[in-house]
Amino acid sequence: MSDDARGLVDLTGSGPDPADSPTVKDAMVVSGTGTDRRSPVAGWLVLVLTGALTLGSVIAWVVSVPPWHPWMLYTLVDLMVGAIYGVVAWLTLLRRTHLAAWIMALAGVGGAISAAAACWSMVAYRWPDVWAPTLPRGSAYWAWVPGFYALIVVLPWLLPVRPIDRSIRIAVGVGAAFIVVAQAYVLTYPDELGAIRLTEPALIAVRAAVEPWLEPVLVLLGFAAAAGVLVRRRTVPPWQRHGLGWLAVGTLLLALAFLPLALNPVLPIGVPVPFAPLLMLGAQAFFPASVLVVVLRQRLWGLELTVRRTLVWALMTGLVIGAYTLGVLLLGTVLPASSAVPEVVVTAVLAAAFQPLRHWVQRRVDRLVHGDGGQPLIRQVADRLRGADRGSQMLDAVADGIADSLRLAAVAITVTGDPPAAPAPPQRFHGSAESPTATGSGPPLVVRLLNGERSVGVLRAWPRAGERLGGRAASVLADLAPVVTALAELAVAQRDLERSRLQLARGRDEERRKLRRDLHDDLGPSLSGVALALAAGRNMLRSHRQLPEVAAVDDLLHRLIAEVDRQAAGVRDLARDLLPPLLDDGALRPALDRLRERYAAAGLTLLVRSPQVTLPEPVATAVYGIVAEAVRNAHRHADVDRCTIDVSSGPDGLEVCVVDEGTGIRPEATVGIGTRSMRERAEGIGADLTIGPAQARPVRPGTRVRLVLPVGAR
């Protein structure tokens, strides 16, 4: 954005990179002290141990050149588990200590140890003189069990990260008990590879009874874990559902990988040996990815930046190596074997395509980490703006859209003149009714909304507990700031307009109040005094009433007294209609009841349906004035003897309807002073006024006056 662009953004720091600003760096710190403890030493130990064992296993396998056997596929599974989960556990432990991280660390270390033991046995087979004690070589059969099984029966219950209830504790306890039984079983192999030798006949019998049930129970527990993930996907808040479908599929694949071993004893034909490990290889290629999807989609533990870069590097490395190898092989089939042209051509093509390819990979990885990019943010904000019709509602809609799209704890937009946002912003909180501070969220990312040098407002974004606000969030908010600035200015203008309307309404009410005093205290008593004086003069002529001339004067005085009394009563009614005293406390129902009593004496029955509503005095006065004018029009022009006043509170605000079944408004009728007065009163309080037929019929359609007072105007 250029410096003169509308809605300049100040991220409370200097420099071109938003991530370099102090506020952004503060917001990127994982908040909380008790729940976000890190274990960097343990993470590095896991990475070094699994990396060294995996590298040593690969070297031992290559140099020993063992004869191929299908059982070696299990060693490939252990190698994959050790390499993948060692890295994932390292990334996680660097940022947060969680039981899921320790399970992945256990799986990685156990898989690496099992693979190293198996490859050590290959070296011993190739060179019998190599020192290879039985116990370390036997660890290939039991070191992988606790971590591998925990991935199936425990880890799925722990994601997404949330408070663990009683049912989850029971499921985790059952899974842990099964792992203990399975570990005891594999540690007591009867041959020389078993770590513990059983001599008691009772224990040997127990082991034999457990053996046929291990794999079936493992499969059932895996199915239960996958079902539990699907149930949580339907019950947790929407922002916690991301990736749970992938996790359920990954758990199901891991459980299905053991199904051949579970069915092997009961099938008439044994399952081929490669079948189970091949399923495990496929499942282990998918399950870590499903765990990462949950971690990345929900951005748990602040891993998104590191894993994003790691994924981009790994994918680019694999694509470049694969493309180079494939290109050289294809060109080598059509060019001479001694020619260096294939290598040169493929290298040149890869060099030219590297940057576009990297951008393509980066976009796909960003979609995995952050969702679908900027378009859903714009769509969510636009969807919410469609239902907002006021400036403050627009800002609330934008705040909700940003919080949902970027998966933030809360977003608060404060415009100039509003009280500053408290640590618990008034906007929507995701996943908890408490404030971000109460739930352990860190300091907010602050974006100042500027129009040139003039401050329009401030946008504050709070990360969820255990998460970070990185440079991408700052960049997205900076790009969105001009739109928010325009909406903030619109909200300020609308707020000022509403204040002006309210001041204008108060001014009019004050003028009406003064006019009421003048009418009630001056003109009304003056007319009453004139009537009394005329009555006194008539009394003075009583002794001469038999004279014809005096009788005519007496009759004239009688008619003048009646007319003056009628006008004095009209002045008093007009004073009450201008600003009824009952509205001084904002209570609408008593004023409507008084209006009903007045018109009952005039022959018009008013049916009033209204709860006890208390409004600001200017608003109550305007509403009453509109109702009184509508009833007056019905009494004078509608040719009816009854009229209905209905007051109700709905989702759109306070709704007031005055309905009659009279002749309706003639098409040729012009807008009179009364209708203009009603519209001016409605505009003064920011309400919507509609006047139309009460029923869709040609004869006596009636008239319906509907006033809707939005919630914000009350």
Image: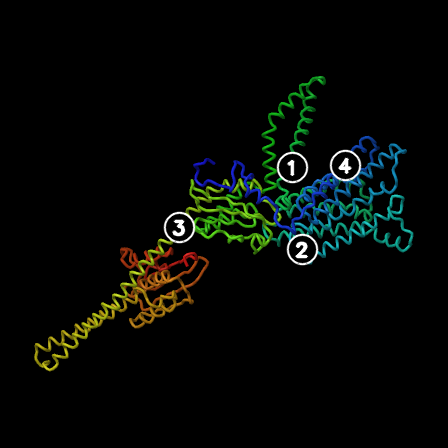
Q: Amino acid at mark 3?
A: Gln
* Dot 3: element: helix
Disc 2 + disc 4, Cβ < 8 Å: no
Disc 3 + disc 1, Cβ < 8 Å: no
4, above or below 702, in the image: above
Q: Amino acid at mark 4?
A: Ala
Query: Which residue is painted at 35% across and 53% down in the image?
Result: 500
Q: Nearer the viewer, mark 2 or mark 4?
A: 4
Task: Give the mark, 1 or 2, whose residue is nearer the N terminus.
Answer: 2
Disc 1 + disc 4, Cβ < 8 Å: no
Measure the alpha-carbon separation of dots 2 and 3.
47 Å
* Dot 1: element: helix
Q: Which residue is mark 4?
A: 52
Q: Amino acid at mark 1?
A: Leu
Q: Which residue is mark 3?
A: 494
Q: Which residue is mark 1?
A: 311
Measure the alpha-carbon separation of dots 1 and 2.
31 Å
Q: Is residue 326 left or right of residue 538?
A: right
Disc 4 + disc 3, Cβ < 8 Å: no
| Residue 579 sits in quarter | bottom left
Q: Which class describes the residues within 10 Å of circle 1: few (<14), some (14-19), or many (20+)?
A: some
Q: Which residue is mark 2?
A: 164
Task: Measuring from the top left, give residue 552's x and y in whole percent.
Answer: 11, 75
Measure the alpha-carbon separation of dots 3 and 1.
48 Å
Q: Amino acid at mark 2?
A: Ile
Disc 1 + disc 2, Cβ < 8 Å: no
Q: Is residue 260 left or right of residue 371?
A: right
Task: Give the mark, 4 or 3, whose residue is nearer the N terminus.
Answer: 4
